Amino acid sequence: MERKYFLGLVTVLVVAALLAACGPKATPCPECPPCPEAGECPTPEPCPKCPEVPAAAAAGERLDIIKERGKIICGVNAELPGFGYLNPQGEFEGFDVDFCKALAAAVFGDPNAVEYRPLTAAERLPALQTGEIDVLIRNTTWTLTRDAENDLNWAAVNFYDGQGMMVRKDSGFKTLEDMEGATICVTTGTTTEMNLADTFRALGIDYTPLLFEKTQDTSAAYEEGRCDGQTSDKSQLAALRSAMANPEDHVILDVTMSKEPLGPLTAHGADEWNDVVRWVVWGMIQAEESGVTSENVDEMLKSEDPTIQRLLGVSGEMGTSLGIPDDFMVQVLKAVGNYGEVYERWLGPDGLDIPRGPNELWTNGGLMYPMAFR
Amino acid sequence: MTPSSSTYAVERHGAVPFWRDIRVIRVIAQIVFVIVVLAIGAWLLDNYRNWLAERNLTFSFRFLRLEASFDLAEGIPFKPTDSYARAFLVGVVNTLRVASVGIVLATLLGLVAGVARLSRNWLVSHIASVYIELIRNTPLLVQLFFLYFAVILKLPKLKTGDEITAITLPGPTYLSNRGLAMPWPRPSESFGAWWPFILAALVVALVLWILRARGVQRTGRPSFNFLWIVVAFLVIPAVGWLIVPGSPLVLDVPVIKGLKARGGTILSPEFVALTLGLVVYTGAFIAEVVRAGILAVPKGQTEAARAQGFTEMQILRLIVLPQALRVIIPPLISQYLNLTKNSSLAIGIGFLDLYAVSNTMLNQSGRVVEVFLMIMAAYLSMSLSISLIMNIVNRRIQIVER
């Protein structure tokens, strides 16, 4: 009896020791570089399912793949009302989603030629790197680390987000300087709390931070009146406000405490496709600048303005050089409208009500500056 | 079994080979076990070292001297230019504040509830039962969330417009969902001249206590120890107060200015919620410990005391509790430790305890392993200190047994 027990114990321990010893070396086929001859892998298991069309090999061909497939696979957020949200009717909607539609309209002339992939923050970058999605439009901040280390290319910026401050309307606060002595709710473990400390220190304002671990707790405490203000990214604040009992009692101050440029991005190696994405975004901004809207687009086709003529494909071959139809912007404008219309629809006073601030056109003192259509 | 039968067995099988000798096997098993444990430990350490090397990091606590650059507004003063080490200290002090206040209050509540549950008064015993069963059988985190979001944050606002809407009690004391602001004595310039009187009061009280205790032992007559000590503590500082120029303590009164109350002392809603939650929760467990301790005292003791004409209060104080304490103390230590460790749930309701601060520290510094080692070391030393003190108390009480 005792011997059996002992032998069993020894066996278990030996096996455990062996496993422990082999553990770190048990990754023989990490990135399967010789994918064409994938069967050559020395392990009994072949490489974990090499994508049929590896992202790296698709340099410049991503656009062809999309055209062949007949639809765009667009990575979006499903849980951020106003930006990317799966509505009760089972449809994706929001600011970012409209850019997916614009891309589909540009390539196929049909805003519904999109397959949406709802992604979490952690899934989004790998989904793009593995080629599972064509483009990611999911409030993703453009940072150096992400751009360089994750083999991604941002196409453009469609929303200049930044850390903002939400306060009660009846508090009368207009600027941060008014908030002397205020208590401010903030979610801990984010850059938000550092930016808050930096900003208020720089302004020399006395304040009391109140830290919560979860965003919904932060918001609940603010709504209960524990804090005079809540700080987070403006898009996030607006979405949180829309879920409050009385959204109209709260305002987001027109102050920005940090840089959070958001925009669509594609994988490295899909350069032609990336060009399409960026020029569709810039085209929408240019359309607003030139005063072309979803309603007057047909009249504007007769415009004498050379920029509008090139934008709408009346003159020049802008679309052809991108590899898509020349009238792509006409389709985009008919499908979703220009940048200002999309903004107004989701983020304007009837939507999340975020002041346009840096997202104004450059001609109105904002940062939205499309590159030259010529 | 006869001696001869075992002799036969040895003859039949010859000498037992060493690998079947139970004494050898025991030694080998222990050696193997130690080797395996060391190997696993070494592998984990090596794994961690590789992880560090891959990221060009080193295991070091040097980050503690760096500027924290986040803000903490609970407990001892802290500003963003202070170091990570001070941030950690803020967390430790806050945890100690909650734990010390919590342990004292939970003990009192538990004692009262435990005795009440055994009361022969129907209403009292049932109220105690309902409290204990309700609290003991729901999770603490749920209770804390309820207490914080549904009770404390529902208190009136401090100000509505320019009008003060907080519940105002004499003092003035303001109770609102921004916390409890109340007057607090602060030492003034002449405090330095006054505190020797307090020290003197302490010495006199101690001497009196010893003298009276000896008197009781010699004469067997009850004496009012407590009364003497109170007199010593009141009279001597009062005399000092009159002698010292000015008043050594001034009352700092809270004033509502701008968006918040300033001056006096302000207990934050988070501190109140956490402390109250822990006291109520742990109190229910202590009540059961107390009840068990009391029931462990033989019934004959109570009956004998009652027959001798002791009042119910005297029976409890002089006969039952001293004997029950022997049973109560060991499980009570566990409850104290639980209360201290449960205080880490503070992170859910925004109180800056040790764990919440450390969480921020590791998020902002990226020093996960170092910070977790510090957290564990801090909780371990707090728990071991409580255990140590309580074990000493326990030993003193156990010796009483004759």
Image (tube, coloured by chain):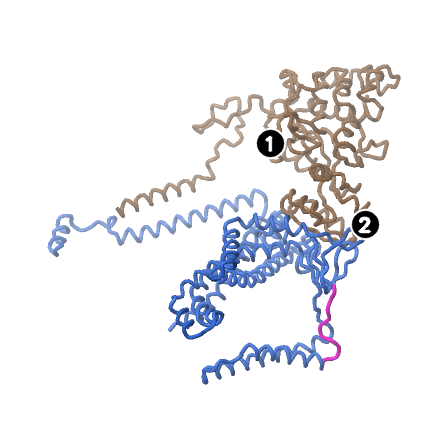
Q: Is residue A264 left or right of residue A374?
A: left
> Which residue is the site of mark 2?
A178
Could you tell me the amino acid type at mark 1? Pro
Task: Please identify which colour was used for chain B in the image.
Answer: blue
Q: Residue at x 76, y 39 (%)?
A: A248
Image x and y of residue A158, in percent: 74, 30
Dot 1 falls on a residue whose secondary structure is helix
Label 2 packing within 10 angstroms: few (<14), some (14-19), many (20+):
few
Image x and y of residue A364, in percent: 86, 33
How many callouts does the rendering have?
A: 2
Q: Is residue B216 visible?
A: yes
Dot 2 falls on a residue whose secondary structure is helix
- Image position of A334 with respect to A81: above or below: above
Name the chain letter of the residue that bears numbered label 1: A
**Label 1 vs label 2: CA separation?**
43 Å
Quarter of the picture holding the C terminus of chain B? bottom left
Q: Nearer the viewer, residue B232 or B17?
A: B232
Residue B223 circle label: none
Q: Nearer the viewer, residue B273 or A352?
A: B273
Q: What is the magenta range?
A: B243-253
Name the chain letter of the residue that bears numbered label 2: A
Contact flag, marks 1 and 2 (Cβ < 8 Å): no
Chain depicted in brown: A
